[in-house]
Image (spheres, helix red, strand yellow):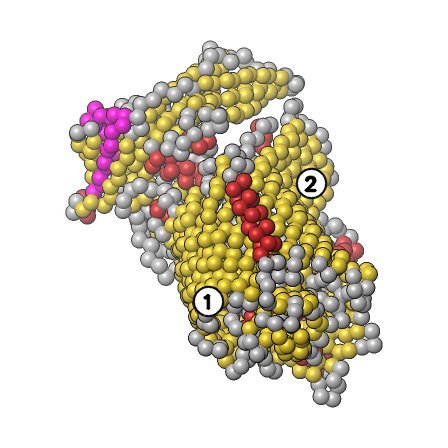
């Protein structure tokens, strides 16, 4: 821990200096406060504050707090947020003023707006490769079986690719799913998928805002190479109770929110559960036979927001979700049971503190736990075998972030964080009543500490140049090995006029955790392990440059970005790697040894480059966006593919997504509305490794008989080169229509969604099938056209 | 009928289109020609060096069945230790042989294997190089216990075997370890090599060491009707220190053989150091040790 001392002491000195500075600005007036939604008092992160006479402005932070320092005077100040009715207040700022603002929601039709870069109302933001989505947008995207899914929406953004058919995994600028930092109210979510990867764990009803950073990372973020997906839950209505429930094809869900103490403490709780297991019950009643299998998943999330006073606020956020699969086989002589379950539990306690009107401090206590369990029991006559296996990762952590706003031209952020990881990459019990002495329990645990400190300074230089410069110092200690690294971050923006800018960024990232996956299907057997002396941390450098243009007074936004990312020491799997971590052949030996995971992986280099185009329509009857990515991703490992570079499995030269929706109220019945939304995606086919031939593999046999022809021919398969075959392109069109009508107690809506409208047979996997006249490749497709019907009722 | 209900019925009818479907691709649009397969493993303890030569069989086009089983008109030349000689084809065993006296195999020496074929006008088809590991005498330790029970009407015997040898925890050391039980009775004397087959876990690197030792443990169970014969049994271990090529090839071969079937399994490429072909040209140093009677 000695290496941490300089980091912590330096950052604490910086925080103290910020506090001192915050009281040292004389001759200036500070306007500060919170921006909220009228009625519910939900905070409005990203809302804009603008002084037209000064041509200066700022935006609210993630908790809705804003602060701007200006010369004393009397000003007209604009407050605005997309989907809300703008407000102009004339304020006497001869001295500093605290001014909380509530914005009224716009009409139903303007509720669903692209948030985009809210800062474009006060000039484009400096940070690039960053996109934001609102909960309403997530709800508008047509999805598989009507399940609103955050990841499926994020996959429509340029630079983000989906994995296999139907999968929720995110591949951002060529990086794998392990390289994404997924945060739910500040807590890391290690396994973000339900149903073997087909749905994400996030319930769209409870989400307020999502921000995705693909590059140009500010110094406050670290720990992953490719992206940061920051999910913020809703605060809950502080004035009245509201709720919503929905019935879908595979699941039902609910959301309730309201005040615990009016205008002081609010809560929001949301949950959903599938009922595939319940749907099997009629089959049992009809056939009289137990189907013997069952599956369900559920998730529950909640948040309590307590405004202690104007300067102090507390947020308690929790999430728990679990998938469970069970099978039971009854025979005359006994029973076999098998269970697989996995899930996340997370919780954060956040304390917002206004140290002064210019200094905002947020301190977060973090807990997160991901666990995967299997259990097998066989009871046949005298034989009684019990075997279990589990793995997981648990974090306890603390982080503190300070934001100091000394002037409209300068924002300083600094913070520290420390996380203690507990890994269980292998734990099992094994009992066999017939084998004397075979009763084994073993748990292999390891611990590590990940910490970091950062300094980030956003500064406007002159009228055109704005910079965001930062430095992050990261530190990791595990298995007696420590790593300490510096991660510089640079982002620059040059204004070309009122509505156009060019941007550039450079970021260095380190990743100290590795994800070991058994297959590409996203099975929950994924294991997180720490970097250690044998397998070091992964690191990347990313350069990006782009151009952004607002068209027709911000009705349209056009941007184009180019990027180059070079990642070193990324993880690749040696041939035949398996991460069950117990050799199945040794289960009968009574003392199975853990497989050395370090031996199963190799480290190499990943190179991604490309261009992203984004055209977004933010206002009007029809809204949506077009995203296109032209990119390549190459891998090179000394121990794979004979050392030659090869394309990544999800290397896609072309990736196109088009999302549009139209919403209107009926003139004859204004209490009714209809929304039509559609999404079209096209992507170059994934690469796969296919067999190309058979051969007799030479094999040296016993040392007393040095004869290279073994006792029997060893037929091996020649796979040529890795990922040399490309599947056919992937494309589909999804459509959804929603009818809403106001009723006495609320609003009810019916939604019909159709996934893969034209029934395209997209490749899921291919197989080499032996026929009488030779071997042929056969492609398998998973989903044809999948219609779904959902019913929702929102009451208040 | 209400138009909305028409939509609903159409959607319900469309459910029938869903589900997993197959589409025939046929032959991939990539040319996969036959590739030459070379196998040769050299060791200072071998009296005779052997090599195999064959062609792979393309999956999506017709191949030569005869060449798949073995090529007899090849020319295989071994160079090293200042000497050079050509293997001779043995038509009975259907592989190529060379007395080790022709090209002595020495520790720490590098050898080159070149493959030509007379039918291709002595064009060089493939070549490979390997280096014999340095001579080291590892301190192999065997711990074996024998235990038997006689629950009628059959007997059951257990042998718990632990083999360990010291090695630095470095990835640059490679081993192949075979072990077996040598059973002797008045009528029988034989070695049964337990893990002497492709697909068995038998290769290790220095990174497998814990506290400076690589340990391998196994438990054998023997049973039969009646009672145990009571013959003499000892454990025997053959530890080969190999070069990186033999290790990586055998490791990949084991991985491919052990890979469970499944559509989502990534294909396991067999490592090869044969330039222009498949297979392996590898080297090893062999050490034997036998335990006392158990």
Closer to the chain start, of discs 1 and 2, is: 2
Viewer-proximal residue, B89 or A527?
A: A527
Q: Pick out the residue farthest to the top.
A: B186
Tell me the quadrant of the picture where the C terminus of chain A can be found: bottom right
Residue at x-position 53% and y-position 36%: A2
Residue at x-position 24% and y-position 41%: B127
Tell me the quadrant of the picture where the N terminus of chain A can be found: top right
Q: What residue did someone put label 1 on?
A: A461
Residue at x-position 47% and y-position 63%: A467
Viewer-proximal residue, A537 or A643?
A: A537
Image-based side of A40 in relation to B242, left or right: right
Residue B208 point in image, percent of width and height? 46, 31
Decide: is B214 above or below A115.
above
Decide: is A751 above or below B108.
below
Q: Secondary structure at mark 1?
A: strand
| Among the 4 quarters of the image, the one containing residue A502 | bottom left
Magenta residue span: B89-116
Residue A552 point in image, percent of width and height? 52, 82
Q: What residue did someone put label 2 on?
A: A336
Q: Is residue A39 magenta?
A: no
């Amino acid at each position: 821990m000695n290496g941490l001392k300089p980091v912590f002491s330096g950052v604490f000195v910086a925080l103290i200096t910020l506090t001192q500075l915050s009281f040292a600005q004389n001759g200036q007036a500070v306007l500060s406060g919170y921006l909220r939604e009228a009625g519910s008092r939900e905070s409005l992160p990203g809302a804009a504050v603008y002084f037209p006479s000064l041509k200066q402005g700022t935006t609210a932070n993630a908790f809705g707090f804003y602060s701007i320092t200006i010369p004393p005077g009397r000003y007209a100040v604009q407050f605005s947020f997309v989907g809300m009715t703008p407000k102009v207040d004339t304020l006497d700022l001869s001295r500093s003023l605290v001014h909380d603002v509530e914005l009224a929601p716009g009409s139903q039709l303007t509720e669903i707006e692209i948030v985009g870069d809210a800062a474009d109302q006060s000039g484009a933001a400096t940070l690039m490769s960053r996109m934001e989505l609102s909960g309403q947008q997530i709800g508008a995207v047509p999805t598989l079986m009507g399940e609103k899914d955050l990841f499926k929406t994020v996959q429509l953004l340029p630079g983000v690719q989906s994995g296999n058919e139907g999968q929720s995994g995110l591949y951002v600028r060529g990086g794998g799913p392990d390289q994404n930092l997924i945060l739910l109210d500040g807590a890391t979510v290690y396994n973000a998928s339900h149903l073997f990867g087909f749905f994400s764990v996030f319930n769209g009803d409870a989400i307020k805002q999502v921000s995705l950073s693909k590059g140009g990372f500010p110094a406050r973020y670290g720990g992953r190479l490719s992206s940061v997906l920051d999910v913020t839950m809703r605060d809950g209505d502080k004035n009245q109770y509201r709720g919503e429930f929905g019935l879908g094809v595979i699941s039902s869900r609910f959301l309730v929110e309201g005040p615990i103490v009016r205008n002081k403490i609010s809560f929001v709780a949301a949950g959903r559960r599938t009922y595939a297991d319940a749907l099997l019950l009629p089959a049992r009643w009809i056939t009289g036979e137990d189907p013997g299998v069952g599956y369900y998943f559920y998730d529950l999330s909640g948040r309590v927001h307590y405004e202690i006073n104007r300067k102090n606020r507390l947020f308690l956020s929790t999430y728990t979700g679990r998938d469970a699969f069970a099978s039971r086989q009854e025979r005359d002589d006994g029973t076999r049971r098998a269970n697989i379950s996995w899930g996340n539990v997370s919780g954060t306690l956040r304390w917002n503190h206004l140290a002064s009107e210019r200094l905002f401090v947020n301190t977060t206590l973090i807990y997160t736990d991901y666990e995967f369990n299997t259990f097998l029991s066989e009871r046949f006559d005298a034989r009684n075998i019990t075997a279990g296996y589990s793995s997981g990762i648990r974090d306890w952590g603390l982080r503190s972030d300070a934001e100091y706003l000394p002037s409209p031209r300068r924002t300083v952020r600094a913070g520290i964080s420390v996380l203690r990881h507990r890994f269980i990459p292998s734990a099992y019990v094994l009992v066999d009543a017939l084998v004397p002495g075979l009763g084994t329990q073993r748990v292999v645990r390891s611990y590590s500490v990940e910490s970091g400190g950062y300094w980030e300074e956003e500064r406007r230089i002159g009228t055109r140049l704005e910079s965001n410069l930062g430095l992050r110092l990261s530190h990791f200690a595990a298995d007696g090995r420590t790593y300490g690294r510096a991660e510089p971050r640079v982002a620059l923006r040059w204004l070309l006029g009122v509505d156009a800018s060019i941007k550039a960024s450079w970021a260095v990232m380190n990743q100290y955790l590795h994800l070991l996956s058994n297959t590409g299907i996203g099975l929950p057997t994924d294991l997180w392990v720490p970097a250690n002396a044998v397998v070091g941390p992964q690191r990347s450098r990313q350069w990006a440059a782009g151009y952004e243009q607002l068209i027709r007074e911000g009705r349209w936004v056009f941007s184009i970005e180019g990027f180059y990312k070079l990642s070193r020491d990324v993880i690749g799997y040696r041939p035949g790697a398996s991460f069950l971590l117990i050799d199945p052949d040794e289960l009968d030996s009574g003392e199975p040894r853990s497989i050395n995971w370090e031996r199963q992986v190799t480290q190499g280099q990943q190179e991604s480059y490309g261009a992203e185009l984004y055209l977004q329509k933010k206002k009007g009857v029809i809204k949506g966006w077009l995203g296109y990515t032209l990119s390549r991703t190459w891998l090179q490992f000394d121990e794979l593919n004979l050392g030659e570079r090869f394309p990544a499995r999800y290397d896609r030269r072309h990736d196109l997504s088009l999302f549009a929706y139209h919403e209107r109220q009926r003139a004859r019945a204004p209490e009714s509305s209809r929304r039509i939304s559609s999404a079209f995606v096209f992507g170059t086919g994934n690469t796969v490794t296919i067999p190309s031939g058979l051969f007799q593999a030479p094999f040296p046999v016993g040392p007393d008989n040095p004869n290279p022809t073994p006792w029997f021919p060893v037929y091996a398969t020649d796979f040529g080169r890795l990922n040399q075959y490309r599947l056919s392109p992937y494309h589909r069109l999804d459509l959804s229509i929603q009818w809403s009508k106001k009723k006495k107690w609320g609003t009810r809506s019916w939604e019909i969604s159709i996934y893969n409208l034209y029934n395209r047979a997209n490749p899921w996997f291919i197989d080499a099938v032996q026929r009488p006249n030779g071997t042929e490749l056969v492609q398998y497709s998973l989903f044809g056209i999948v219609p779904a019907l959902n019913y929702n009722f929102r009451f208040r | 009928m209400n138009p909305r209900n028409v939509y609903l019925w159409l959607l319900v009818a469309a459910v029938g289109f869903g589900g997993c479907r197959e589409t025939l691709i046929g032959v991939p649009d990539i040319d996969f020609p036959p590739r030459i397969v070379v196998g040769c493993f050299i060791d200072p303890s071998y009296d005779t060096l052997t090599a195999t030569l064959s062609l792979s069989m393309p999956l999506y086009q017709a191949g030569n069945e005869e060449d798949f089983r073995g090529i007899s008109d090849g020319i295989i030349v071994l160079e090293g230790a200042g000497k050079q000689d050509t293997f001779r084809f043995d038509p009975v065993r259907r592989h190529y042989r060379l007395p080790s006296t022709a090209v002595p195999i020495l520790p720490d020496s590098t050898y080159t294997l070149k493959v030509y074929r007379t039918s291709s006008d002595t064009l060089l088809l493939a070549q490979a190089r390997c280096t014999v590991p340095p001579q080291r005498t590892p301190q192999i330790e065997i711990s074996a216990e024998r235990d038997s029970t006689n629950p009628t009407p059959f007997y059951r015997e257990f042998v718990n075997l632990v083999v360990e040898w010291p090695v630095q925890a470095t990835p640059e050391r490679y081993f192949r370890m075979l072990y077996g039980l040598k059973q002797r009775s008045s009528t029988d004397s034989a070695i049964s090599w337990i893990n002497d087959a492709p697909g068995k876990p038998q290769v290790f690197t220095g990174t497998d060491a814990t506290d400076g030792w690589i340990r391998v443990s196994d438990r054998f169970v023997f049973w039969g009707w009646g009672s145990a014969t009571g013959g003499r049994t000892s454990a025997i271990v053959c530890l080969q220190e190999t070069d990186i090529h033999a290790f990586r090839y055998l490791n990949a071969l084991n991985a491919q053989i052990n890979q469970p079937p499944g559509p989502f399994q990534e294909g396991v490429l067999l490592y090869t150091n044969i330039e222009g072909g498949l297979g392996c040209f590898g080297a090893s140093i062999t050490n034997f040790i036998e335990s006392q009677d158990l």
